Structure formats: structure tokens, C-alpha cells
Image (tube, rainbow, N blue to C red):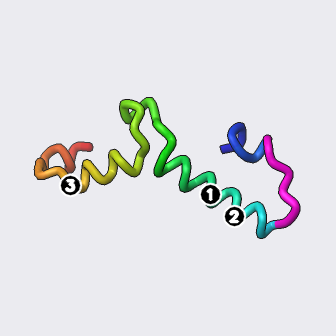
Amino acid sequence: MRDELLNREWFRSRAEAKVLIERWRQFYNERRPHSAHRYQPPATVRRAWLDSDNIDARLTA
């Protein structure tokens, strides 16, 4: 987060910082690909895991 947001932005207020950080968090978790998840966003991986019928895979993940 520091390299992708905090070091690049100059926040004019605490309210602006909260809005921009929340926007970045949503992007990071819902749209940004992660190499650890085979270049899928965490939200996609989580939905697939929750939809999985394989309880053993869910318990060991």
C-alpha cells in the first residue's frame, strides 16, 4: 500500500485520505491480480473457495 498509494498521494484532509485508501483497498482486493492466486484478484479466489463443494479443500486452504 505504501508504494502504490501512500508515497504517491498528498492528502488534503483526513476525510480525503479515508476515501482514497478505501478506494485503493477495494481495487486491491476486488480487481488487482495477485501472483499468489494465479493472477486472479483475492475476491475471485474467495468466491470460488466459498462456492466449492469440496469441504476438504476448504478446510486445508
Instruction: Residue 14: name its quadrant.
Output: bottom right
Asked if disc 2 and disc 1 are in contact, CB closer than 8 Å, the reply is yes
Q: Is residue 26 above or below residue 60?
A: below
Residue at point 86%, 51% (across, down): 10
Q: Amino acid at mark 2?
A: Val
Left or right of 53 on screen, residue 21: right
- Measured Cα–Cα span from mark 3 to mark 2: 31 Å
Does 9 lie within the magenta span? yes
Location of the N terminus by quadrant is top right
Q: Which residue is mark 2?
A: 19
- Measured Cα–Cα span from mark 2 to mark 1: 6 Å
Residue at point 71%, 42% (across, down): 2
Q: Which residues are magenta?
A: 8-13
- Measured Cα–Cα span from mark 1 to mark 3: 26 Å
Left or right of 54 on screen, residue 16: right
Pick the front one: 1 or 24: 24
Residue at point 11%, 48% (across, down): 54
Q: Amino acid at mark 3?
A: Asp
Q: Which residue is mark 3?
A: 51
Dot 3: element = helix
Q: Position of residue 26 (x, y in %)?
A: 54, 55
Dot 1: element = helix
Pick the front one: 3 or 59: 3
Q: Position of residue 24 (x, y in %)?
A: 62, 52
Does 23 lie within the magenta span? no
Q: Which residue is mark 1?
A: 23
Q: Is residue 51 above or below residue 42?
A: below
